[in-house]
Image (cartoon, rainbow, N blue to C red):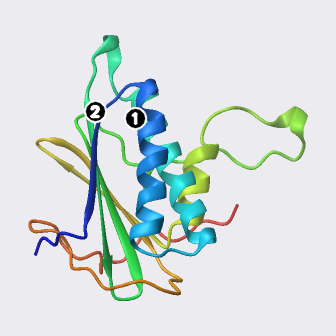
Amino acid sequence: MATESSLELVIHARIEHQPDLAHWVEKLAVEFLLPQSLSHRIDLCLTELVSNVISYGYPEGKIGTVRIRCWREPEQIVIRLDDDAIPFDPTSCALPGLPSSLDDATSGGRGIRLVRHFTDELHHVRTAEGNQLTLVFRSLDTGTHLSAPEGTASAETPKATRQPL
């Protein structure tokens, strides 16, 4: 069921819209009375995921759309990111091993590792419209209960297990 208190952001998948995302996360933190540590986790995850969609999701210069919705359920914040980019499932992609030194470090896969670490649940579904990624964050201290927006499922399903850093 949709509620007025659920928040939504729709942006064009362009790097210049990253500040819109940062402002939206700030609004989210105020609206839901989130502890600063949780707000930082959400900001890090969304910044990484949206940056990946912008950088890798649209070949040949296509400009797509990213829609982010957030709502509160008992004891958790749920965020759903929908995009019309090429298929990509961050819950099942293989991550590179951790390097033994900075000299051994390679680029790639570090952001997804962080997202897996800082979310309590992470679910991906590929639909006819595109990628649908649901992030669940727990450890809430304050705020009010909000229901899931109409047409969205509760995030009660099992997660790709939380990965250590």
Above or below: residue 141 compared with residue 157: below
**SS of the residue under disc 2:** loop
The label on residue 85 is 2
Image position, residue 91 (x, y; %) = 43, 56
Q: Is residue 21 left or right of residue 153?
A: right
Q: Residue at x 58, y 65 (%)?
A: 118
Residue 22 x/y as whole percent: 49, 46
Q: Residue at x 88, y 38 (%)?
A: 102
* Apparent side of residue 39 relative to residue 27 in the rendered image (left or right): right
Mark 1 residue type? Val
Q: Verify CB contact (< 8 Å) between mark 1 and mark 2.
A: yes
| Image point (32%, 11%), residue name | 60
For the residues labelled 1 and 2, the Cα–Cα distance comes to: 7 Å
Name the image quarter holding residue 116.
Answer: bottom right
Q: Quadrant of the N terminus?
A: bottom left
Q: Is residue 123 above or below residue 110?
A: below
Find residue 52 and report its horizontal and vertical position in percent: 47, 35
Could you tell whether 47 is left or right of 57 in the image? right
**Residue 46 sits above or below residue 17 on the image:** below
Of the pair 26 and 159, the residue shown nearer to us: 26
Position above or below: 145 against 92: below
Q: Earlier in the sequence, mark 1 or mark 2?
A: 1
Camera-nearest residue between 80 and 32: 32
At label 2, which amino acid type do we have? Ala
Give the secondary structure at mark 1. Answer: helix
Residue 112 in percent (x, y) is at 55, 49
Q: In the rendered image, which quarter is residue 153 located in?
A: bottom left
The residue carrying mark 1 is 53
